[in-house]
Amino acid sequence: MSTALPEDFKNRMKTQLGGQYASFIESYENTPVRSFRLNICRSEGIDRAHLSRIMAGSDTPDQVPHCNFAYYYDDAAPGKTALHEAGACYIQEASAMLPVTMLDVNDSGQKILDLCAAPGGKSTQIADLMRGAGLLVSNEIIPSRAQILSENIERMGVANALVISSDPQKLTGRFGGFFDRILVDAPCSGEGMFRKNPEAVSEWSIDNVKMCSERQDMLLDCAVSMLSEDGRIVYSTCTFAPLEDEEAAQRFLERHPDFEICEGPVKLYPHAFRGEGHFAVAFMRRSEIGNGIVSGFSPSSVGRRNAAKPLNALIDELSSTARENDRKRLLGEWLDNSGFSTAAGDCYDRILTFGDSIYLAPEYTCDLSGLKVLRAGIKLGTFKKNRFEPDHALSHCLTKDDVDLYLDLPNDSGEIKQYLSGMTLNCDKDMKGWCLICVDGFGLGWAKAVGGILKNHYPKGLRQG
């Protein structure tokens, strides 16, 4: 690697690894491996083996050992392809996929918190396993990183997530005993990323390791106060420092003797694993000891944001009965097409309005007043001059099988490049209305068919070229 490793770091690793130290140091001369994870939630009915070959640029891509539908790639980069922009995959470092596999996520309607969620790799991995059920709260305290997190949540078509930007200590008073699963992927000294990110080397110091360990202790204590009685916490870092890893786990158990390790700890080194460095361990309360926490939340006490009104309140403000019926019908059609029809009754209870914009909030959405909310579920669309315009975010929750009017284009087609650049496309003159533009089956964006032309509605800020 171009940047020399700090001497204090090497001396500690020599003691830490013993006879494996030479192999560890040699691994820094190797090029970092690259990997991606397919969006399994949105690829139902799509040939995933074929999709993985397209994304990896290989007929026989190697799978990441601990994560289903995750693969390594070499020369072909999935980034900036139409499939990537449609949310068919997330480019994620292979070792970073480990912690979520220890979180015990399912599609039963869990309430899950990703406490330090940016840029979104682990949050979207969690969402994949939730399959749209339950509530995922993805939090990032740094506003600029929270915005990137929100964009990745949207790109991957996650409909059951609240993206917020809050101090973790502030959340404890709002979500006492609320979550079934909490991931604490803590900010750390970044030793596991030295090979991939030389900047982390220049920022490393013994004092920084100690500072990170103190912050990690605080984050874990915050997580405990927000965990339900039978919940699970997964703590992870991308560092090798025992002070931030094994010793952090031991300090946690000493501060919280009602907890025990239920899985791990696992530590990945670049000389022994095809990826970078990572650490993960899972905690649960001891079964024979109660937690003593009185939950401040329950499904019966959960309500909407104070600033929001249910859809029928918006409709009541509209002028004519005919217009009211038209809008109800239009919204009902979009709910059916968006794949939420399996819980249609609950859906209507979760429809929120902000002005003329309409959102579908996740299950268990609570009062979020006073918190900075970047994304409250999925924006369905907006009423504009007595017509409904579907939102770009909705397109990423859909496939061609969810709608009646679509144009499905190959990933490498000239037409898909035209669409991504903002150009119009040709279509059958009989086509009329909103058309979902798809790439190999994945919803990519909207166009409006008028007189044999598809008018491009791909957001200007996302256009390429």
Image (cartoon, rainbow, N blue to C red):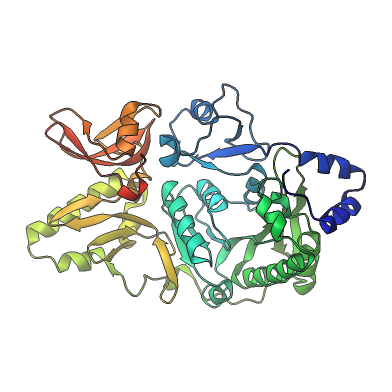
Residue 92 at least partly seen: yes
> Percent position (x, y) of residue 357?
26, 61
> Percent position (x, y) of residue 422?
28, 40
Q: How many marks do you count on the picture?
A: 0
Please, is residue 110 above or below residue 436 in the view? below
* The one of 108 and 283 positioned closer to us in this rendering: 283
Please, is residue 24 above or below residue 228 in the view? above
Horizontally, residue 81 falls left or right of residue 380, namely right
Please, is residue 297 above or below residue 190 in the view? below
Which quadrant: the C terminus? top left
Which quadrant: the N terminus? top right
Please, is residue 114 above or below residue 121 in the view? below
> Percent position (x, y) of residue 92?
58, 44
* The one of 231 and 254 positioned closer to us in this rendering: 254
Residue 281 at least partly seen: no
* The one of 92 and 100 positioned closer to us in this rendering: 92
> Percent position (x, y) of residue 174?
51, 75
Horizontally, residue 242 falls left or right of residue 211, namely right
For image coordinates 63% across by 32% down, the residue present is 63
Horizontally, residue 273 falls left or right of residue 35, namely right
Horizontally, residue 29 falls left or right of residue 146, namely right
Q: In the image as oriented, which residue stretches furthest toward the top?
A: 59
For image coordinates 51% across by 52% down, the residue present is 108
For image coordinates 55% across by 72% down, the residue present is 167
Q: Quadrant of residue 185?
A: bottom right
